[in-house]
Image: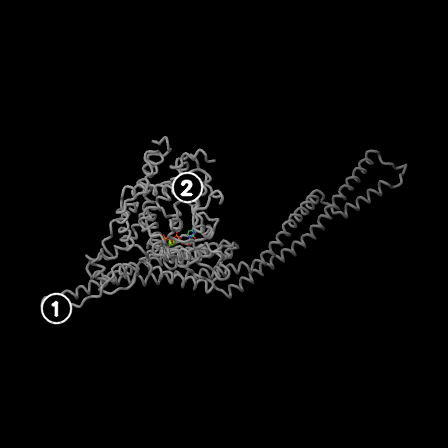
């Protein structure tokens, strides 16, 4: 592998971060932006004004109506306990129109359990797409896409600090120049693909704070410090106290710099003058904080060391940016080594292009080629026969009805399945007591049976050996004893052999007697334990019939339980079945939504085609003299409505078609978002960007780092 000896970067990495690489390997000087040509600044300002006319929240209406819809939905689901508030760019006035919709769901009383799952389920039923849950984050989030408006939405739970900081950003953005400056920073960051926190670059929010910091530091300041008042305004969130004071009064700046000039100094500041190792971006301070004092000095490896594989350790405070209210929150916490390299490459690139007199448009060139614009909203319908389209439309409508019926039957089936599941759970609960009683009987029965068996073996073992009953043995023993102890008749004495035989017979009888007694005792104990065992068996039988009674009673009440094996395993099977049904329902919902959208589009086209047909002058009709002027049409607004499924007049539709459908707006929006995602997907091989000035400029410092 071809690796640079100075930097350790591979050829691929050198191509990916060319400006940074040249800088790191000392091939090029850092350009100075001190003496920019005045004419260049004027031209750049004109360019920025043109761009500003096209950026802005073109989807504001869609955002509003989607917010209203989701509010209603969530409030119906969580009753009056739920509170839904928008935050982020849709309320700050800092939207480029390409950003997401940020909503905060909070609860007035107790937060429901498994709330994220419930929200996700609700959204699924609504036909939302790409639903993702991020439950373990500090602020849990559900992300999804509303395919009707195309909006990406983040619903975060109890993100109350964000509501407050959005209010403050709104105060900053009330000043036109501040707003437009931040919009241009966001525009650059978005088109250059460095505003994606989850991919390891900075969030739009962090870029906004950097923009404000720059405006606070110009001389004289363009933006004030809105947190410099003496009166704290404390709120408590999750047991922590935060000062959310925000002086929202208008601020008259004496600074007359133009947007272009402010942007140039922004790049100059953050690309070359800002020492990330010592300075923390802090808008609540109105200027940088000392990193050492804040204990936010960079620790861990440098981004370069990570990307060149010299270290795998975690980096801390790589580009420290303090949250204005949560002072412990460093917004660069999520920046990854590659992200940091890319950000610094972008700073270097902007610096170089500006110094070469390149246009703002070029500086903000999207990182990926913009896709070919789609022909128009109705491009595939134009060549089709209207009658066939009408026929297709009818078929689609029938299909929608079928899908709706299917959904209904699936919902009913799931409902039944859930009811049965609850019933099963209840039944198992009811029979649980009887079952535990049986368990304890069985626990006692087991050792009892073993003992009975043991006694039986002892008894039968003895009886096998000694067939004579105890009584007979005893009589025989007495007889022998008497005979052996009778007075000796000296005239009639036994011989010695016979006497020996009698004695051993007597001893045998004695041993037999002992064993026989043992057998009798074993038998008695056996009988006693058998009685006990029988009692337990009877109790066991009783529990069986008791369980049967409980079940019969339940089955009588709920005949659907009949034939079901009442076992925890069955409950699990029912649960799985209910989940499966829910999945099928979701699929059918998406299908229905898609069909509906397509029906709407075809119907609109049929209306347009029909009206065009009517408007065509008939050959024998007189030429029209005064044609009534159609009302002026705002094409962007119509495109927006068309793309979100809104209604519009035929005149508007006509205008839409003659201007190439909704493709204009859509493609612009998609271009910048898809650029980012495409670049992500396509891998970063082909991209040519990225940085960390600290690494280059301060490379000498590296040795002194600990
Ligand atoms: N936010 C926050 N902490 C973060 C990131 C975001 O508190 N680390 C909150 C801020 O209130 C911010 C909002 O989330 O205003 C939205 O963040 P983001 O989407 O990054 O900014 P937007 O201005 O909405 O940018 P875009 O238009 O690109 O969506
Ligand atoms: Mg946002």
Residue at x 28% of width, y 64% of height: 647
* Residue 574 in sight: no
Tell which residue pokes out farthest to the right in this image.
490
Count neighbours of disc 2 (C-alpha within 10 A) and say few if under 14, some if 14 to 19, many if 20 or more. Answer: some
Compared to residue 48, the image places residue 430 above or below, namely below
Residue 275 numbered mark, or none: 2
Image x and y of residue 558, in percent: 49, 64
Viewer-nearest residue: 391 or 92: 92
Q: Secondary structure at mark 2?
A: loop
Q: Quadrant of the N terminus?
A: top left
Position of residue 608 in the picture relative to residue 163 (left or right):
left
Position of residue 302 in the picture relative to residue 610 (left or right):
right
* Residue 427 in sight: yes
Compared to residue 374, the image places residue 682 above or below, namely above
Residue 388 numbered mark, or none: none
Tell me whether the residue at label 1 lies in contact with that at label 2, contact meaning CB atoms closer than 8 angstroms.
no
Image x and y of residue 126, in percent: 37, 60
Q: Secondary structure at mark 1?
A: loop
Q: Which residue is mark 1?
A: 625
Image x and y of residue 293, in percent: 49, 44
Residue at x 73% of width, y 48% of height: 521
């Amino acid at each position: 592998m071809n690796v640079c000896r100075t930097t350790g970067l591979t050829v691929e990495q050198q191509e990916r971060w060319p400006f940074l690489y040249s800088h790191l390997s000392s091939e090029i000087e850092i350009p100075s932006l001190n003496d920019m040509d005045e004419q260049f600044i004027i031209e750049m300002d004109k360019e920025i004004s043109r761009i500003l006319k096209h950026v802005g929240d073109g989807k504001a209406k869609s955002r509003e109506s989607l917010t209203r819809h989701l509010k209603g939905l969530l409030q119906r689901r969580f009753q009056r306990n739920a509170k839904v508030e928008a935050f982020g760019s849709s309320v700050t006035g800092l939207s480029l129109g390409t950003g997401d919709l940020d909503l905060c769901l909070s609860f007035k009383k107790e937060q429901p359990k498994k709330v994220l799952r419930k929200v996700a389920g609700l959204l699924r039923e609504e036909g939302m797409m790409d639903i993702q849950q991020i439950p373990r984050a500090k602020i849990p989030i559900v992300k999804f896409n509303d395919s009707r408006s195309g909006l990406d939405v983040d619903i975060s739970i109890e993100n109350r600090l964000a509501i407050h900081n959005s209010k403050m950003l709104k105060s900053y953005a009330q000043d036109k120049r501040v707003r437009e400056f931040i919009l241009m920073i966001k525009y650059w960051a978005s088109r250059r693909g460095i505003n994606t926190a989850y991919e390891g670059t900075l969030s739009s929010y962090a870029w906004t704070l950097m923009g404000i910091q720059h405006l606070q530091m110009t001389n004289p300041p363009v933006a004030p410090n809105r947190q410099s008042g003496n009166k704290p305004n404390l709120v408590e969130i999750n047991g922590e106290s935060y000062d959310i004071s925000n002086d929202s009064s208008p601020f008259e700046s004496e600074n007359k710099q133009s947007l272009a000039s402010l942007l140039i100094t922004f790049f100059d500041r953050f690309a070359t003058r800002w020492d990330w190792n010592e300075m923390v971006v802090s808008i609540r301070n109105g200027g940088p904080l000392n990193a050492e004092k804040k204990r936010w000095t960079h620790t861990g490896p440098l981004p370069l060391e990570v990307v060149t594989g010299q270290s795998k350790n975690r980096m801390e405070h790589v580009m420290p940016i303090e949250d204005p209210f949560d002072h412990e929150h460093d917004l660069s916490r999520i920046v990854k080594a590659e992200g940091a390299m890319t950000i610094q490459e972008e700073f270097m690139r902007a610096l170089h292009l500006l110094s070469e007199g390149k246009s703002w448009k070029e500086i903000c060139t999207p990182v990926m080629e913009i896709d070919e614009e789609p022909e128009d909203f109705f491009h595939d319908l134009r060549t089709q026969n209207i009658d066939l389209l009408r026929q297709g439309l009818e078929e689609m409508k029938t299909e929608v009805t079928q899908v709706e019926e299917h959904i209904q039957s699936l919902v009913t089936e799931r409902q039944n399945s859930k009811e049965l599941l609850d019933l099963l759970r209840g039944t198992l609960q009811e029979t649980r007591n009887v079952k535990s009683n049986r368990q304890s009987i069985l626990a006692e029965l087991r050792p009892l049976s073993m003992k009975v068996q043991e006694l039986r073996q002892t008894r039968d073992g003895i009886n096998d050996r000694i067939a004579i009953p105890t009584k007979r043995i005893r009589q025989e023993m007495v007889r022998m004893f008497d005979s052996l102890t009778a007075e000796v008749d000296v005239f009639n004495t036994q011989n010695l052999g016979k006497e020996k035989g009698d004695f051993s017979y007597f001893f045998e009888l004695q041993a037999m007697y002992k064993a026989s007694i043992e057998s009798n005792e074993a038998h008695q104990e056996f009988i006693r334990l058998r009685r006990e065992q029988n009692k337990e068996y009877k109790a066991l039988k009783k529990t069986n019939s008791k369980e049967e009674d409980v079940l019969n009673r339940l089955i009588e009440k709920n005949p659907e339980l009949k034939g079901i094996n009442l076992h925890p395993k069955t409950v699990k099977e029912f649960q799985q079945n209910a989940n499966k049904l829910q999945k099928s329902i979701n699929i059918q919902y998406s299908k229905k939504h898609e069909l509906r959208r397509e029906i709407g589009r075809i119907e609109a086209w049929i209306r347009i085609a029909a009206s065009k047909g009517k408007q065509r002058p008939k050959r024998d009709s007189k030429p029209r003299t005064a044609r009534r002027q159609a009302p002026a049409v705002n094409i962007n607004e119509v495109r927006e409505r068309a793309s979100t499924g809104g209604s519009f007049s035929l005149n508007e539709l006509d205008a839409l078609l003659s201007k190439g459908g909704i493709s204009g707006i859509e493609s612009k929006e998609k271009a910048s978002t898809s650029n980012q995602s495409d670049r992500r997907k396509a891998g970063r091989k082909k991209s040519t960007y990225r940085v960390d000035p600290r690494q280059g400029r301060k490379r000498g410092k590296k040795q002194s780092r600990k």
